[in-house]
Amino acid sequence: MAKKKKSIELTQQKLSFVDKGITYKLIRFKPENMTVDVIRYEGERKLDNYNIPFAHLPRELKRKVKPT
């Protein structure tokens, strides 16, 4: 049976990026399906929790998360 990979918490690292005026703060990386849970902010206002593919992260954040 395949071994289930655990999610990696990213809240302590305080990683974030801005795209089209919306700030994305990384919460958790899920290696089993290569997605990242984020919280979206517009200015100081929290919009929602969101799930994006790992491939859509900026290159510098991909290096910090390092899925192995």
Image (cartoon, rainbow, N blue to C red):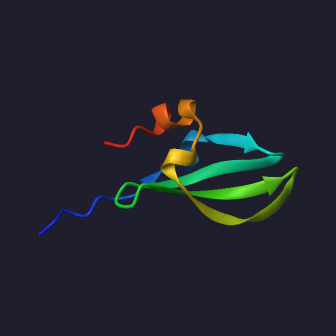
Which residue is depicted at the point 79% across and 64% down? 47
Depth check: 31 or 12 in front? 31
In the image, residue 7 lies at what x, y percent? 40, 58
Q: Is residue 60 above or below residue 42?
A: above
In the image, residue 58 lies at what x, y percent? 59, 37
In the image, residue 24 lies at what x, y percent? 69, 49
- How many numbered marks appear? 0
Q: Is residue 1 above or below residue 68?
A: below
Q: Is residue 14 above or below residue 38?
A: above
Q: Is residue 58 above or below residue 31?
A: above
Q: Is residue 51 left or right of residue 18?
A: left
Q: Quadrant of the C terminus?
A: top left
Q: Quadrant of the N terminus?
A: bottom left
Q: Is residue 2 left or right of residue 46?
A: left
Which residue is depicted at the point 60% across and 50% down? 26
The image quarter in which residue 15 lies = top right
In the image, residue 4 lies at what x, y percent? 25, 64
Most extreme residue toward the bottom, as rendered? 1
Which residue is depicted at the point 57% across and 43% down? 57
Q: Is residue 39 left or right of residue 3?
A: right
Which residue is depicted at the point 87% across and 52% down? 44
Q: Is residue 3 left or right of residue 52?
A: left
